[in-house]
Each structure stands twice: as structure tokens, then as C-alpha cells.
Amino acid sequence: MGRRVVLGLLGLGAAGVAGGHWLTTELGRLSAALSRHHLNSLSSFIPGAGWRYYTVTDGFPYRAPAVYRLTVTGNVGNELTLKTTDLARMPRTRLTADFQCVTGWRVSGVRWEGVRLGHLLDLAATDPGQQAVTFVSYDGTYTESLTMSQARRSDVLVVDTLDGRPIGREHGGPVRLLVAPMYGYKSCKWLSQIVVTDRLEPGYWEQQGYDQNAWVGRSNGRDDAPTT
Amino acid sequence: MTATGLPRFTRAERWVHRSTAGLVAVLTATGASLYVEQIALLVGRRPLVEAIHIAAGLALPLPMVIGLVVSPSLRADVRVLGRFGTVDWQWLRRRDRRRAQLPVGKFNGGQKLAASVMCGAGLVLLGTGLLLIAPLRVNLPVGLRQGATIVHDLFTFGLLALLGGHLWLALTHPEARTALRTGEVDRAYAEREHPGWAADVTAVPAKPPG
């Protein structure tokens, strides 16, 4: 009997691993449904659904909104240094999308608000013929990059608001990137520098083998449903 | 054996229990500071916490494996834990299990069930943990890492609930704690909770023939 219990649990575990994609999706759906009915406190008790917090450095870096600065530099005619209040005064864009991590978890219907990256590139008077944009995190380690045409998409934002609230430290606040149609690792947290370059430089995870063009469902060998 | 105590656990068994408990405590603390947002923010030092969690996880089966190799009494106890008899089923089914004066052996049905579940869940956590730390260049099928993540989470929640019960029973049964600390259990307690076993231990050995 003891052996049967042990083997049964091992079987259950193996089935869960094999059906993990389905299981994760269903739990995520349940959690999203609870959130929609303002049962956030309940939905947070569903394991495996919701945000997971990653950092590639020793801790979660933090800069208070008051001292935070975002620079736009590189091959531009007009270098920018922006405060959170500058971003707040710019033309704002709202966007609701699922957030999909390349490791499998997905958060449904996340509401973001911020400024289109393309708008910042216009303000900085990007030199003609530039191919790419690099993003640097103030954690001192993380970088990301997009091609110029990706960077100018309408669903690529520099965001400061998440689900109606200022973006917290664990989510990469006060300001982070959101590349809505791509896997989460493209959405650089704790964003501090936007650098316009003449050619594409692979970011932190790309150097470790992840896809540069990280379209959800069409890269990294995954087949998730599109997020936008 | 003394007038008031019966030998219940050998030194090796106590060592296995204590080392495994220590590793589980480390795994719980480090796991919580990787998983729970508020604790993660408080603790930080993620790579270090991760390394400790992985080391403790890899070490988790070692005390048990070493114990099984060196200790015949641990092997005997494991055999007893895995074997469910009529008394164990009665113990699990009957609501008056504590008053029914069942001839419970060294472990009751609940303890046997809990031991099997902990063993199975522990192995699942170890296996999914290994999948999770598999380096990127090992090209695992994409769904596998996702499956391992969710199973690791769900089994952790289940096992923590079970361990909560385990700790509650330990808190409410000081005699059981003493047995795991000193190796000897109070005779009256044993005769009440494990009468079948107490009778076996105290039985006068048969006189040699002739």
C-alpha cells in the first residue's frame, strides 16, 4: 500500500509535468476570472497563476520616482533626459494584453499605461538609417534590444502604470519597457537608458541563447497563443 | 529499556530525521524567499538564495539514503511503514480510532499514510527540481519546464500543508518529541498509542529450550 501511494504520487507528478501547459493555462484563466470579479485576494491564493518576479542581479534594484531619470542617447540629434513627470505629461497610450513568460507562466489581461517608444524616438530626433535600439536596466546588468521597426510598433511602450497603479519595484518600476507582442524577457525592467544604434546588439538573454525576435507563439520553440 | 521508557528510535534514525528536517527547513525558507513577492523584496540576494535552495534540494535524499545503508533498524521501520494491515485500515476508517483500543503497531495508519505521501511528494519535488535546474543547452521539450514549474509549486503547497499537520501533532505530543530526541518513548504513552508494538517490545523473550 505504501508503495502504491508513492508510485501514485510519482504518476500524478509525471502527468502534471506532461500536462503542465494545460494546467498552467487553466489556473491562469481561473485566476483572471476571479480578478475580474474583484476577488484579487482569492486569486492570489491560486498557485502557479500570476506574476513571478525575476532579477538577474543580487536583489531588486530600486530608484525612487523623484530621483529616477531615463535617458535617450546614441545616434540621435537631440539627447533626452526624462523624469517621471515628463513622461506623465506626454501623449499617453493604454494597452491591455496578456503577459507571457518564456518559461510558461502567463498573466491574463494586464492593463498597462505609458508613452509609445516611437514617440520618444521622434522627440530624440533619431538619425536616419539607424537599425536598432538597445535598452539598459539600472540593475547594472540587464540589457535588451529591438530592431528599429519593432521599436516603432504601436504596442511597444515605455510604461509607468500597471493595472491602474504606479509600477512597483518588483515589476521593474518606476519605469519599464513593455514589448506587448513578445515574451516577457524583452520587456526590460528598471529601464534607465534607451540607446539608438546602427546595428542590433543582442541583449542579456539573447547572449544565452534565447531568440532575438521573441514573438509570443512564434519563437523559442513555443506555441503559446498570441498576447495581443 | 528502562522502567518508564521503551527504545523507539536508534541514533541513526534520529540523525536521519533531524538532518532531513533541517534540509526541509532550509528549502522552505529559501523557497519562500524565491516565490513570495514580499519576502523576495525583503531578502534580495537572489542568486545566493537560489544556490542554497538547489544545494539543499540535491542533499535532501542523502540522509535517508545513508541511513538505509548503515542502519538495519531504519530499514526495518521503513518496511513497517510501507505495509498496511487490517489494524491500519481500521485506524484510518474508524472515527473512534483512539478509543477503539486497536492493537496499533509501531506506527499507526495515519503515520504510515503520511510517510508514504511525504516520500512520494518529496521525490516529485526532487524530480521537478532537477528539471528546473537543467541548463538551457539541454534542449528539454518546451512544455516540460512549464509542467515542472507548476507541479513543483502545487506539490510544495500540498507537502507544506501535510508538514503543518506533522508539526501540529508533534507540538501536541511531547512524548513523541522526546522519543525523537532521546530515542526512548514513555512506556505509558506507548501502551496507549501503540499497544501492539509496546507488547512486542516488553514481551519476555521465550526461554531457550532445554
Image (tube, rainbow, N blue to C red):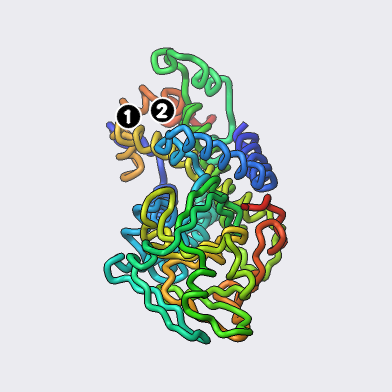
Dot 1: within a 10 Å radius of its alpha carbon, few (fewer than 14), some, or many (20 or more) residues? many
Q: What residue type is labelled 2?
A: Ala
Q: Which of B205 and A112 is in front in this view?
A: A112
Say which chain tag 2 marks: B
Relative to residue B91, is residue A6 depicted above or below? below
The answer to whether one can see residue B70 in this image is: no
Which residue is pictured at 53% across the width and 35% down the height?
A: A33
Relative to residue A77, is residue A213 depicted above or below? above
Image position of B114 (left or right of A20)? left
| Res B187 label | 1
Dot 2: within a 10 Å radius of its alpha carbon, few (fewer than 14), some, or many (20 or more) residues? many
State the separation of the CA atoms marked 1 and 2: 8 Å
Which residue is pictured at 54% across the width and 51% down the height?
A: B68
Whether the residues at callouts 1 and 2 have beta carbons within 8 Å, the answer is: yes
Q: Nearer the viewer, residue A123 or B177?
A: A123
Q: Mark 2 points at which residue?
A: B198
Q: Nearer the viewer, residue A120 or A181?
A: A120
Co-location on one chain, circles 1 and 2: yes
* Quadrant in which the N terminus of chain A is drawn: top right
Determine the image quadrant of residue B134.
Answer: bottom right
Horizontal and vertical percent for residue A124?
Answer: 47, 79
Q: Which of B104 and A106 is in front in this view?
A: A106
Image position of B157 (left or right of A100)? left
